Image (spheres, rainbow, N blue to C red):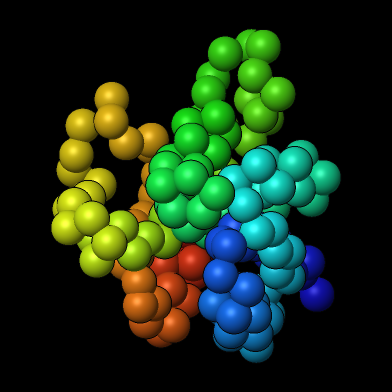
């Protein structure tokens, strides 16, 4: 049997992490949680996931974007260079909180290169579909 795909779920909302983890585990995914951008980067190097689901607003309003930038940093000196190609799904309530609008079509100079955006509140079926597309 194939190994379960490993997902790193990074969000400071422990209840959301619990519910999303349960939903993903019922679909056969191995889920590892982290509760801040900094913790997510630390756990990333330990667990080497197949996919990262990353909240934006955690310890700072842009912690998720900052973590994604570090993961996508292609410099030889980056300690995350081995993880450049891991798919990233960004979760955000930033639209509700700041009335900002983000999309994958925005300038990459502002937004890190991510595979998918999903706004909160999360539609579990939509999340599962995005996960399945991202870790074929």
Q: Residue at image x 70%, y 69%?
A: 31
Inspect this view and state whether residue 87 appears.
Answer: no
- Looking at the picture, how far across and down is residue 7, in whole percent? 65, 62
- Looking at the picture, how far across and down is residue 52, in whole percent? 57, 54
Q: Nearer the viewer, residue 10 or 86?
A: 10
Query: Which quarter of the picture shows residue 81?
Result: top right
Q: Nearer the viewer, residue 62 or 123?
A: 62
Where is 19 relative to 54, above or below? below
- Looking at the picture, how far across and down is residue 86, in whole percent? 57, 44
Query: Which quarter of the picture shows residue 92?
Result: bottom left
Query: Which quarter of the picture shows residue 62?
Result: top left
Q: Nearer the viewer, residue 50 or 65?
A: 65
Inspect this view and state whether residue 83 appears.
Answer: yes
Residue 22 as seen in the image, left or right of residue 48: left
Q: Nearer the viewer, residue 1 or 63?
A: 63
Q: Residue at image x 24%, y 66%?
A: 96
Q: Residue at image x 35%, y 77%?
A: 121
- Looking at the picture, how far across and down is residue 38, in whole percent? 65, 42
Where is 24 relative to 115, above or below? below
Where is 36 relative to 129, above or below? above
Residue 108 as seen in the image, left or right of residue 46: left
Q: Quadrant of the N terminus?
A: bottom right
Q: Residue furthest top?
A: 76
Where is 130 relative to 59, above or below? below
Q: Tally the marks.
A: 0
């Amino acid at each position: 049997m194939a190994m379960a795909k490993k997902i790193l779920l990074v969000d400071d909302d422990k209840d959301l992490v619990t519910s999303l983890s349960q939903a993903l585990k019922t679909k056969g995914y191995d889920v590892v949680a982290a509760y801040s951008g900094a913790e997510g980067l630390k756990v990333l190097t330990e667990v080497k996931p197949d996919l990262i689901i990353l909240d934006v607003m955690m310890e700072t309003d842009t912690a998720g974007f900052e973590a994604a930038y570090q993961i996508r940093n292609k410099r030889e000196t980056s300690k995350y260079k081995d993880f450049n190609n891991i798919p990233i799904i960004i979760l955000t309530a930033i639209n509700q909180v700041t009335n900002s609008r983000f999309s994958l079509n925005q300038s990459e100079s502002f937004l890190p290169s991510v595979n998918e955006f999903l706004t909160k509140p999360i539609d579990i079926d939509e999340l599962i579909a995005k996960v399945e597309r991202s870790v074929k």
